[in-house]
Image (tube, coloured by chain):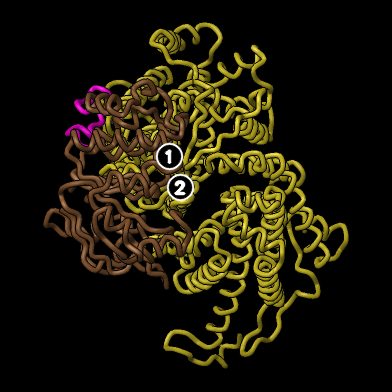
Chain colours: A brown, B yellow
Amino acid sequence: MLETRNLTKTFGALTAVNSVDLTIEREGIHSIIGPNGAGKSTLFHLLTGYHQPTEGTIRFEGENIEGKSPRTIVDKGISRSFQISDLFDGLTVEENVRIATQSLDENRNSVWKRSDSIDSTRKAETLMEDLDLTEFADTRADALSHGDRRKLEVGLAIAVEPDLMLLDEPTAGMGNEGSAKMVQTIRRIADERDIKLVLIEHDLEMVMEISDRITVLNRGAILKEGDPETIQADEDVQEAYIGTGEGE
Amino acid sequence: MIASQSLPLLAFISVEQAAFLLLNGLALGVLYVLIAAGFAVIFGITDVLNFAHGAFYMVGAYLTLAVVDATGSFFVALIVGPIAVAGIGVVAERLTLSNIYDRSPLYHVLITFGVLLIVTELVEIVWGTGTQFFQTPELLAGAVQVGPIAYPKYRLFTILAGAVIALGTWLLIRYSRFGLILRAGAQDQATARLMGVNIKKYYTLTFALGTFLAAIAGGLASPFLSVNPEMGNGALIIAFVVVAIGGLGSFAGAVVAGLLVGFTQAAVDTFVPALSGFVFYILLLAALLIKPEGILGDYEIRKHAAKLSYDERIPPVPLTDRRVLALLGALLLLPVVGLNTVMSSYGVGLVALMFIWGILALSLDTVTGYTGLISFGHAAFYGVGSYVVALTTLNVTNSFLLSMGAAILVAASIAWLVGAISARLSGLYFAIITFAIGQLLYQMSVSWSGLTGGSNGLSIDRVELLGFVDVSDTVTFYYLALAMLVASYYVAKRIMDSPFGLQLQAIRESERRTTFLGYNTNMAKRRIFAVSGALGGVAGGLFVTLQTFTSPETLFWVVSGDALFAMVLGGVGTLYGPIIGGAVLIGLDQILTIYFDHWRMLLGLILIVIVLFAPRGLVSFYAIGAELLRGERGPFGSAEPEPVEERGD
């Protein structure tokens, strides 16, 4: 589904992503883990056009997308969420979701229709129900609890109906119970809507439980790749984590 | 220079000419560096675009002059005067900016504009509006031989003094503890605070340093430029242009760009004097097109995206259909009833002028209130609208509909172009660029006198609505302006309620996220800027029809400042609030001017009070009043302290 070859990003003297050959298959949940500064978020930035690669190629469904703008890449079917929630704070939850679902509406640029009367409004309502956010429809995004903000963050990525969704630590800063529930919700919705999930996660226990395939990044390069059992048993991976502090 | 000795350097320039050029360029450049350095220091550290910078430069010149008069020593004055100005700067900062550093840059811009209004009027009260004569100190009078040429001693002194001051400032920022804390605070306020640094105190000191530099530049410049209340305008433009070319907030960038602009100005003055007034703007536009972040801009533009955050706990007065209809009915009846009782035709004209300013402030609200782009150049569209109507009426047709159509078209096209140049810039860069383009058009209207009548402006007489209704009649015009206001509001409202309007508000809240939802945000910004420009053009076209006169004043940047003021005064981001704000501001303006010479000082005070205590403008007074009555709110905000919310992200 997605394939990178020799993908490299340098910032001055620092090589944040170093010659990464990553293959993401259609089936299953794929997680990317690694210690802080391993280059996980930079990798996402490259895949979504937020940063331009210094070298290398990215192919999505057989088409080269490196060097394309974020907007073009979303159109091709890759959406993402951010590690630090990037919401439309001054707008209501309903407007947040609606601006996202509206992006696919044929009337998205209309200047004369009412924005709450076009077709995509229905989709927004459905998605809010799926995310259990309906009761906050009229609440401003900046007045939500942290957990609900994370949910809305992922909701925006879902709303643009991607084939592939890259979630950057969707449960960051949430308690264990909240995280587990959140992951359940995301999996359910992704299944229903046939969205391939790629996650960056810190919670190793959860990663092992939900992932079908895991890529371990360390210092910008791929250290190991395999199913959870292989990764868990790998000594190099343990070394990489212990070397920089467990799970951090 | 002795002609017989002149040596050819190149085919077209002699060694003497080259030497003059070099020294003139250096003298101008050093002055520009000093003017811009203070501005850059303040911006680099506090993120505030200080519109009062030119005013402090002007006060610097006046106070230096005053100390010279008192002590007889220019050198004492050059130290004491600027220190006094720094003191004034500290008082101004403590009373205004220091309370609102955490707010949107829109309010920073406005509150410094308020300070500018007050300071300028105070100077006029103390020293009058005339030009003061500043004698070159005896020691520095006359010329001295520099290589092949005799050069004025005072200019050499300026070069030397400027270089010493700039170097001293650089050393201060680079190597002192004060400088270290400033740079740390600029990087990361929260951490600096955790380290026990009282960051606000350092912001105040920064402001003192910035105003000191502005004032000493004013003092140095006075002997060879004229000292008058207008001189601050020129300095403000220099500061903007130099800092934008050098890279926002970069001190070294300001030095490089200041010298660059100085040399270019000196060369253009010598070889192409016709372009003399355009040097700043041409350089700025070139810099923006080639390297938009500036020569030494290491600055992350996104970090400073001007995010407008609204306090929704203060809801504006709801705009119900009944209220709208009642108001509209009253306005329709006003001339009919008024003219027979209390109103003169002047009064009817004044209300029509209020409609015009309502349209102008409304046009600004669509880009600033809704899209989050701070435009400090809306005078451009207002002025262009007025000139296009005047020129079409004089040269083509006296049909109002046709000339207004042309005005809308031209204003929208210019706005689209401005949007295309500046849409990829966000936040305060946008404010600077729109400001500069507005001033460029102002300069054109003054210089191209064959077309525009220069500073005398253009007068028109009879304008007709499609050849039969005389629009010059005040009552007819009143209804025309009212109709245009209602139509403008309707169009703006429909757009903001549309999917496109929701996009604009999303851009205001987070342009990055809007892009990641697949929207072309640059296109959206260009489109709304064109719409806004068209509405600004409508306001300008109506203005010239009412006054039968237009002049470069309509294009002057102070009009842009007033438009922002009107928008916030009424209630930013509500569409109808700005209409009220525009009406109230121009109404106050026209009435106060009858009774007070220095009424703009009062406007400055009102502006500061609004920004500090009622940032959501007049439309929030109803809710604030209700809270006050219930005792839920003290005069300085909510009675209970805000709960400090720690968010994981």
Neighbours of disc 1 within 10 Å: few (<14), some (14-19), many (20+): many
Tell whether A4 sits left or right of B147.
left
Give the answer, above or below, for where B406 lies relative to B258: above
Residue A104 in the magenta stretch? The answer is yes
Say which amino acid is labelled 1. Answer: Gly
Q: Which of these two is toward me, B30 or B454?
A: B30
Residue at the (25%, 26%) spot, across then down: B466
Neighbours of disc 2 within 10 Å: few (<14), some (14-19), many (20+): many
Please state the total of marks drawn on the protein image. Answer: 2
Residue at the (31%, 48%) spot, across then down: A208
Q: Position of residue A181 (x, y in %)?
A: 35, 33
Label pair 2/1, CB-CB below 8 angstroms: yes
Task: Give the SS element for disc 2.
Answer: loop
Q: Nearer the viewer, mark 2 or mark 1?
A: 2
Give the image quarter of residue A151: top left
Res B305 label: 2
Span of residues in magenta: A103-120
Q: Residue furthest right?
A: B71
Q: Which of these two is toward me, A26 or B395?
A: A26
